[in-house]
Image (cartoon, grey):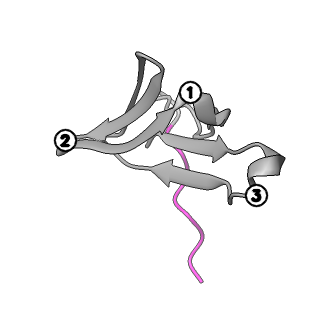
Amino acid sequence: MPAYLIVHPREQRREDVLIEGDDLTLTVTDGWALFTDQHGICLAIPAGLGAQVQRVDEPHDPDHPEPAPPKE
């Protein structure tokens, strides 16, 4: 599942945001970072904000599936 961490400059005093979703797609166009899913745009960040967008999910390798999470 794609996951992105949005890190704002310190002087803006904004919380960093993690967004994730099965059908989440990032497109950078006309000075905007657009996050879309099957329903359309879910988040738009203007380049002028100075925020950094980092992909933080683990790459999916179908030949080596992840182990099931431990049961509690």
- Count up the numbered dots: 3
Q: Looking at the image, do the residues carrying marks 1 and 2 touch, with CB atoms under 8 Å apart?
A: no
Residue, disc 1? 47
Q: Which residues are magenta?
A: 65-72
Mark 3 closeness class: few <14, some 14–19, many ≥20 residues within 10 Å:
few
Residue, disc 2? 38
Residue, disc 3? 13
Q: Does 72 appear above or below 40? A: below
> Residue 28: x, y in percent?
44, 20
For image coordinates 60% across by 29% down, the residue present is 48
Mark 2 closeness class: few <14, some 14–19, many ≥20 residues within 10 Å:
few
Residue 62 visible? The answer is no
User: Closest to the observer: 44 or 48?
Assistant: 48
Question: Helix, strand or loop at disc 2?
Answer: loop
Disc on the earlier residue, 1 or 2 = 2
> Residue 53: x, y in percent?
61, 34
Q: Does 13 appear above or below 9? A: below
